[in-house]
Image: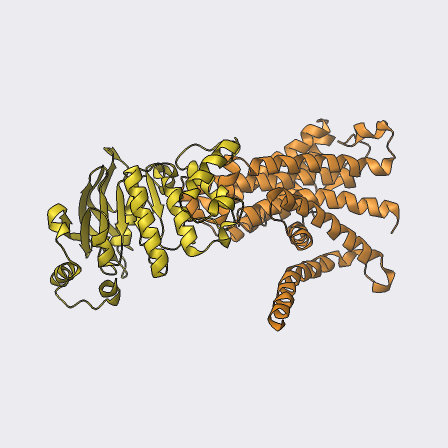
Amino acid sequence: MIDVQDIHVRFNAGTALEKHAVQGLSLTIPEGQFVTVIGSNGAGKSTLLNVLAGEVLPTTGRLMIDNQEVTRWPTSRRAGLVARVFQDPLAGTCERLSIEENLALALHRGKRRGLSRALHADQREHLRSRLAVLGLGLEGRMQDRMGLLSGGQRQAVSLVMATLTPPRILLLDEHTAALDPKTAAFIMGLTDRVVAERRLTTLMVTHSMRQALDHGNRTIMLHEGRVVLDVTGHERKGMRVEDLLHMFEKVRGQEVEDDRLLLG
Amino acid sequence: MSLIAFLGAIEIGLMYGLVAIGVYLSFRILDFPDLTVDGSLPLGAAVGATLIVAGVPPVVATLAGGLAGGLAGLVTAWLSVRLGILHLLASILTMIALHSVNLRVMGKPNQPLLGVDTVFTPFESLGLSPYWVTPVVLLGIVAAILLAVNWFLGSELGLAMRATGANARMARAQGIHTGWLTMLGIALSNGLVGMAGALFAQIQGGADITMGVGVIVVGLAAVILGEAIVSPRVIVIALIACVLGSIVYRLTVALALNAGFLGLQAQDLKLVTAVLVVVAMVLPGLRRKYAGSKAVAR
């Protein structure tokens, strides 16, 4: 269970550039829930994700994962609990390393690393079988450099990497935004599958209202660093994109100008 | 070129092969442009030579030179990782500081090693001609270190180090302490260079405060030359390329200095080095461009 308690994040505190990105955000995500997060630019979506991942430390507030306080833990220390797929397909993998080396890194996520070999024969077999599930033929290219893969292929591998060692929470940071529509649909299908198969607690940030309603089982909307809408269950089932849009306009008190939200 | 000059070039080439492996670790694996080596090579030489003169067994003295170099690297990495000083500047600061340290270690600007036993002495009684002893022993040392570095880079920790240099954000997300691994890697890199310095002092008969000038350029020249010759895809080949590049570089320099019609002399060494590095850096780009234009024309 993830428990975000009254988190505040201030960037450049005390300067003219001060930004109060997250303003008292609280959120409890029970085990196995798949939450989708929407909100306009600057609403605090990425900051929330970075707080969960440890890239940004909150100014005040507490973050609990499985009743353990991790608020001040750096990224590397909480990596055993948190897995992440980045928006930029280049960010989540090492292009200079081979596919199998990338997977081997993920296999040891959050574990002690010693001087034993990074890749054993039986591990190779396991990794190959995990890649084969993608149906992209990558299992036959284990020694290829990651940089040779397309953006979609790299995101697919990133998803596999995120689930090799099951995390307590999976963070998806607009992970299909940089892909063409067909590839994005493939990656979303894959996401639904791995999340369901491994019953992963998941938080997905998206720019698309369509995506936010079609996937997962809870949707929250952020505005000015707070949760302004939180729908789940029955209420969410009957919701259409127009309803969400309407609520969005209401909280913003103005017409939606962001094309990306309408088009999604 | 005479056989003696040839073997001399091979000797120095092998010794700088260790430097090249160190530079490969910092520049290529960790993506950390580290100039500390200009200070850590003479540090290793100073420590090694001083200890040998003091009666310490040469093998121990050589390892101590490596340890001293490693500590110097640790200082640079610490300045950069913990104090947030730009890596290039941090390494220059350490390098400058080491100049004083090296003078302190030796107590004078140079420490001759004449008439004392070195790591090469025990092998002289094996019946090998004296000119061959040093290159053969060096080849053994370099081969052993190359295999050890390759073994390390294939371990979980080594892979984590490679990820740190390739994509630090991703590495952290995988639970890798990128700061620690940078410190370990830069220490390892300078440890190899320090050891090379200790061996260098034993090859050329002493340590000298000026022997570090331009070491980084020579090391980099070896790495780049090796990559241009071999274009390696796996780590072990990349490491071999470092040593090969270093030897080729030495032979090229020896040839250039020997070619009377060029009119080059020993004092032109640094200039030749710099020109060679520029050529080696530009060449792969030109080759790609040429290959590219050919493909378009077809």
Q: Position of residue A138 (x, y in %)?
A: 47, 47
Q: Is residue B99 visible?
A: no
Q: Residue furthest bottom?
A: B297
Q: Position of residue B70 (x, y in %)?
A: 58, 38
Q: How many marks?
A: 0
Q: Residue, x 55% and y 46% (percent of image)?
A: B29
Query: Which quarter of the figure has residue A264?
Result: bottom left
Q: Is residue A51 left or right of residue A246?
A: right
Display colour for chain A: yellow
Q: Is residue A198 left or right of residue B180?
A: left
Q: Position of residue A57 (x, y in %)?
A: 29, 46
Q: Residue, x 78% and y 51% (percent of image)?
A: B251
Q: Is residue B8 above or below residue B54?
A: below
Q: Is residue B286 visible?
A: yes
Q: Residue, x 21% and y 69% (percent of image)?
A: A257
Q: In the picture, one chain is orange; tell me its letter.
A: B
Query: Which quarter of the figure has residue A249?
Result: bottom left
Q: Is residue A159 left or right of residue B105?
A: left
Q: Quick one: quadrant of the C terminus of chain B?
A: bottom right
From the viewer's side, name the closer residue of B282 and B200: B282
From the viewer's side, name the closer residue of B250 and B157: B157
